[in-house]
Image (tube, rainbow, N blue to C red):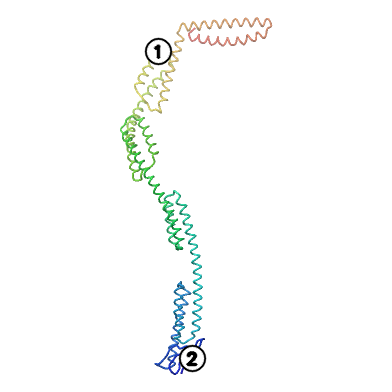
């Protein structure tokens, strides 16, 4: 018979293990000595120790599911209970009890964490739904579309809730996206229709612009092109792929007209500049008539200059006022000289001037006598009044005498 602190082998080869509940049969040994039997069953015990240690480490260091951990614990507990090993089986049972408690605690902690995670996920999904519903009413089509796609990606990254809650929130979320998508499609459909109408309007503007491109009615046609440009801008934009082609055609029609007008205007401007040079020569010829001596000769010379002036034609607009102002100054000088000559040689006018002068002279003489009489009589007030009247008559007499001298009188 052989024994150690945790087991023994009797004379029949039966192996026993000692536990708190007493000895239990661990097995039998017939092939060798009792010490070999104990050593064999002790090795089986050590194997259990190693397995329990490995399970403890897995529970402590990995995310082993509680269900899987408890299955493994039950398997080891069954091996310990069956007592096919020699060693401190009670200690192994206590380790398994402690490990079971640890797994239960971990499972509760995970349950609490899971509950908290689900609550956070629920709140996050509710926030996503609220944002999606708010975005669905906006009209920032591109930015909102991108944001909704980002919200979907965020949703996919969140844990699933209970089926009912998750389905309800997803239904609201999906409905908001669908509502926005429908509004966006309707908006762009209307925009496409509007752009198609714009394209048709611009086609009509192009047709008119092309019809006008050969016009030589420069002023009215240029004005109409300006109106067409205003109508073009007011029409808005057509489809992107058509807008550039439409504009190219519209602009080309205008370019044909304005290029032709520019060519004609360039020729006209050259002619006008030449006309200006010729008229400036006539101005110099006219200004040599000043001051006017022989009125008849000056009028004849100016008439000749005028005929040549009219035959020349237009000058540049910016130079017109200056050159015409100079010739008009000579015309006024000739006209004034003619008026002065007429007054000087008109007998009727000279007679009227002489008669007026005589009347004014008589009035002056009469007032001088009246003033002398008043002063002799000591009537100073009357004399002063007559003096003021005399000053006025003398001024008129001086003017009349000046006019009479112009007649050579």
**Residue that sits furthest to the front in the current view:** 164
Of residue 165 and residue 108, the one placed in the foreground of this image is 165
Residue on which the image places disc 2: 4
Q: Is residue 282 left or right of residue 358?
A: left
Res. 251 in view: no
Label 2 and label 1: CA atoms lie apart by 168 Å
Position in image of residue 86 (x %, y %): 46, 87
Q: Is residue 365 left or right of residue 35?
A: right
Q: Is residue 312 left or right of residue 46?
A: left
Residue on which the image places disc 1: 296
The vertical placement of 401 against 91, above or below, is: above
Sequence order check: which comes first, mark 2 or mark 1?
2
Residue at 37% across / 26% down in the picture?
315
Of residue 49 and residue 232, the one placed in the foreground of this image is 49
Few, some or many C-alpha atoms within 10 Å of disc 2 (few <14, some 14-19, many ≥20)? few
Few, some or many C-alpha atoms within 10 Å of disc 1 (few <14, some 14-19, many ≥20)? few
The vertical placement of 148 against 402, above or below, is: below
Position in image of residue 390 (x %, y %): 60, 9
Of residue 205 and residue 53, the one placed in the foreground of this image is 53
């Amino acid at each position: 018979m052989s024994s150690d602190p945790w087991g023994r082998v009797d004379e029949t080869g039966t192996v026993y293990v000692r536990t708190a509940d007493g000895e239990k049969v661990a097995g039998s040994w017939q092939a060798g000595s009792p010490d070999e039997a104990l050593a064999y069953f002790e090795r089986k015990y050590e194997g259990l120790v190693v397995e329990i240690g490995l399970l403890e480490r897995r529970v402590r260091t990995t995310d082993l599911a509680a269900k899987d951990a408890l299955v493994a614990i039950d398997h080891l507990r069954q091996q310990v209970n069956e007592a096919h090993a020699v060693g401190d089986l009670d200690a192994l049972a206590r380790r398994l009890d402690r490990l079971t408690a640890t797994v239960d605690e971990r499972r509760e902690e995970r349950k609490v964490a899971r509950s908290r995670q689900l609550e956070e996920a629920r709140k996050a999904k509710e926030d996503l739904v609220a944002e999606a519903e708010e975005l669905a009413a906006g009209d920032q089509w591109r930015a909102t579309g991108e944001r909704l796609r980002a919200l979907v990606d965020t949703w996919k990254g969140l844990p699933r809730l209970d089926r009912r809650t998750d389905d309800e929130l997803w239904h609201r979320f999906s409905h908001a996206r669908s509502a926005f998508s429908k509004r966006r499609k309707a908006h762009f459909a209307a925009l496409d229709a509007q752009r198609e109408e714009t394209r048709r309007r611009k086609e009509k503007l192009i047709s008119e612009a092309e019809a006008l491109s050969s016009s030589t009615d420069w002023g009215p046609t240029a004005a109409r092109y300006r109106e067409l440009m205003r109508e073009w801008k007011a029409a808005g934009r057509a489809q992107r792929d058509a807008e550039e082609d439409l504009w190219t055609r519209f602009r080309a029609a205008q370019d044909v007209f304005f290029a032709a007008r520019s060519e004609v205007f360039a020729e006209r401007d050259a002619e006008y500049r030449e006309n200006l040079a010729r008229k400036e020569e006539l101005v110099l010829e006219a200004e040599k008539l000043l001051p006017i001596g022989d009125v008849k000769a000056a009028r004849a010379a100016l008439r000749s200059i005028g005929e040549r002036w009219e035959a020349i034609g237009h000058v540049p607009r910016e130079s017109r006022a200056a050159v015409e102002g100079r010739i008009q100054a000579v015309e006024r000088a000739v006209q004034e000289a003619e008026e002065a000559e007429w007054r000087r040689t008109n007998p009727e006018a000279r007679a009227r001037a002489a008669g007026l002068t005589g009347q004014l002279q008589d009035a002056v003489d009469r007032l001088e006598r009246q003033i002398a009489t008043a002063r002799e009589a000591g009537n100073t007030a009357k004399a002063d009044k007559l003096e003021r009247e005399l000053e006025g008559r003398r001024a008129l007499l001086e003017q009349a005498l000046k006019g009479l001298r112009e007649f050579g009188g």
